[in-house]
Amino acid sequence: MAKTKQEPLDQVFMALADGTRRKMVHMLAESELSVSELSEPFDMSLAAVSKHIKVLENARLIKRRIEGRSHIFQLVPEQLTGALDWISIYRYFWSKRMDNLEQLFNESEQVNEGKKSED
Amino acid sequence: MAKTKQEPLDQVFMALADGTRRKMVHMLAESELSVSELSEPFDMSLAAVSKHIKVLENARLIKRRIEGRSHIFQLVPEQLTGALDWISIYRYFWSKRMDNLEQLFNESEQVNEGKKSED
DNA sequence: ACAATATTCAACCTTTTGGTTGAATATAAA
DNA sequence: TTTATATTCAACCAAAAGGTTGAATATTGT
């Protein structure tokens, strides 16, 4: 193996980095679905679909329930929330950037009052 | 190339699917940094760091500015916002699930009036 | 002009990803 | 019990990811 431990966020973001899987997540946001139902919009083998599903499952984005010969999948929102939380650092960045803009604004006010030259 | 066109979200999520790059994003949320400053916490070659940076850059999560011999990077929040928006489908899921829970609750009330046993 | 600093480029290597096909497993239906 | 349905497994493959090293490029300081 490449890494001893793969962080959950690694797996979640990796799982979402593929259009097929993102579409699957959207489908499962609508309702529970079986493998063949999930495979319907995609032009690939069932084995390939099965692998995509496993990626989502390992990332704990979905949960499997076996019902007879059908495997039914359900979206599990916790990990999505985790990803959302991580990305939310950008809010912090925004606030920083706002500070900078404020600063720039103040500086430009001074410039307008005096006529100052920097560097 | 494998795919003719790589979707922006593919690139953004892929970029975030790596702890090193996520840390870089966090660092750049604090302040602008050069390549060597960005490389500081990581135990890898500058060439490797350079590659990680390029991934973030291609995903348009960061912006490069060349100042003399230094390359300075700045976080760009737009794509993060895009990712955030995408994930927000989970809110929709929540509302669906709430409906189900409500339903379950109603069902269990009926059950509780009788008798219950589960393992 | 020369050396030091900052960074990228190119070639290479290994592991992972995303797909294929054909066979295997498990359940359901005739 | 045979056949159809639902899904996975195993082996294989090509391309991408993530790292290395050594050389190249560009800028700055002496």
Image: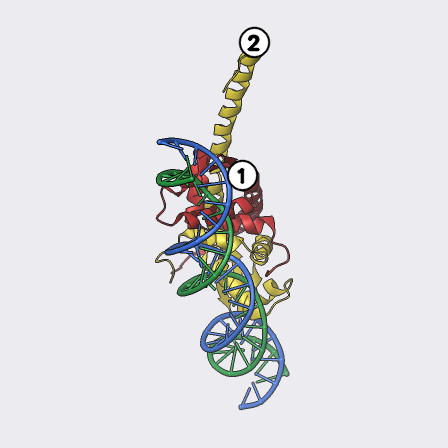
Chain colours: A yellow, B red, C green, D blue
Q: Is residue C22 above or below residue A113?
A: below
Q: Quick one: quadrant of the C terminus of chain B?
A: bottom left
Q: Nearer the viewer, residue B36 or B20?
A: B36
As drawn, B29 above or below C8: above
Tally of marks: 2
Asked if marks 1 and 2 touch (Cβ < 8 Å), the reply is no
Nearer to me, A79 or B48: B48
What is the x, y in percent for residue B101?
A: 51, 49
- Tell me the residue at 44%/36% (across/down): B33
Disc 2 residue type (three-letter): Glu
- Find numbered disc 1 in the image and state the secondary structure of the residue it sits on: strand
Tell me if A1 is positioned left or right of B53 in this view. left
Q: Are marks 1 and 2 on the same chain?
A: no
Q: Which residue is mark 2?
A: A113
Image x and y of residue C18, in percent: 55, 63
As drawn, D17 above or below A34: above
* Amino acid type, callout 1: Lys
Looking at this rendering, what residue extends furthest in the top direction? A114
Residue B100 position, x and y percent, is: 54, 51
Other residues around mark 1 within 10 Å, as few (<14) / some (14–19) / many (≥20): some
- Name the quadrant containing residue C29: bottom right
Q: Nearer the viewer, residue B13 or B20?
A: B20
Q: Position of residue B52 (x, y in %)?
A: 46, 48
Picture layout, residue B68 above or below residue A57: above
- Residue A82 lies left or right of residue A40; in this view the side is left
Q: What residue is shown with label 1?
A: B63
